[in-house]
Image (spheres, rainbow, N blue to C red):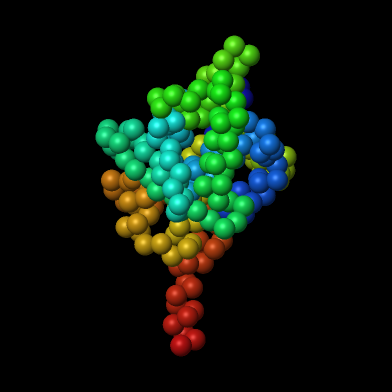
Amino acid sequence: MTRNIAVPKVALTMADLTAFYPYFDRSTFEGARDWCACVLAFFGLLRVGEYTDGRLRMQDVRLAHWGVSLTLPFSKTSLIPTQVDIVSRTDILCPARATAEYLSFFRRFPGLPQRPADPFFITRLPTGFTPLSPADFITRVRKVIQGVLPGRHPKAYAGHSFRRGGTTALKLAGVSDSIIQLHGRWKSDAYRRYIDSDNNLNTRLLATAALTSAVRS
């Protein structure tokens, strides 16, 4: 009897996102949508259930001069709306630019759903549209991994790989634990499990980097 062995899920990194960028054809609706979902999930530390299946609506996403503001109607840890603010960047990973590119399709094609309560991420169908599902999004991300990172096991990546990657990136950037916990909407120290030290050398080196500096001084 063959046993199905679960593949441990790992984090996507900023280097991985950079490698993804040229793979997405952002001149197409689907390419712009998938890229926008990737960067918002990564920098917003979003759970996959917070932005798929129609849970994130048109009225919940707002562009500002400083970046993107998301209002999550509810989440795993909160039954009341929670605001997530994501600052702009000056590189290709800019969440505001990705959001603006995706929204431009709604201005060009009035037939797309644009009412405030309509889902933000959608899948177009010959007869209309349906909310982007977690399974569809994860399948598309795994196809990108197969094309861009052929040495990786696609099934090692899932929706939470963006949340894990964003958390790890914040830690590596020196963001305090309290801010990481607040930004990721954790009510406890469970965020520590999302710091991917097993698959990230830089994270593991943080343990002794400070000691090295102390010796040199």
Answer left or right for 49 relative to 91. left
Answer left or right for 203 relative to 85. right
**Quarter of image, res 174:** bottom left
Relative to 20, say whether 29 is above or below.
above
Q: Quadrant of the N terminus?
A: top right
**Residue 45 percent location from the top left of the image:** 44, 46
Relative to 124, say whether 75 is above or below.
below
Nearest the eye: 74 or 99:
99
Who's the residue at 40% across and 32% down the image? 59
**Residue 130 percent location from the top left of the image:** 52, 19
Relative to 143, say whether 171 is above or below.
below
**Quarter of image, res 27:** top right
**Quarter of image, res 56:** top left
Nearest the eye: 152 or 129:
129
Who's the residue at 66% across and 46% down the image? 21
User: Could you tell me if residue 103 is visible in this image?
Assistant: yes
User: Could you tell me if residue 33 is visible in this image?
Assistant: no
Residue farthest along the top direction in this orientation = 127
Answer left or right for 142 relative to 182. right
Residue farthest along the bottom direction in this orientation = 217
Nearest the eye: 197 or 46:
46
**Residue 207 percent location from the top left of the image:** 45, 67
Relative to 153, say whether 214 is above or below.
below
**Residue 205 percent location from the top left of the image:** 51, 67
Who's the residue at 50% across and 56% down the image? 169
Tally the numbered discs.
0
Who's the residue at 32% across and 46% down the image? 186
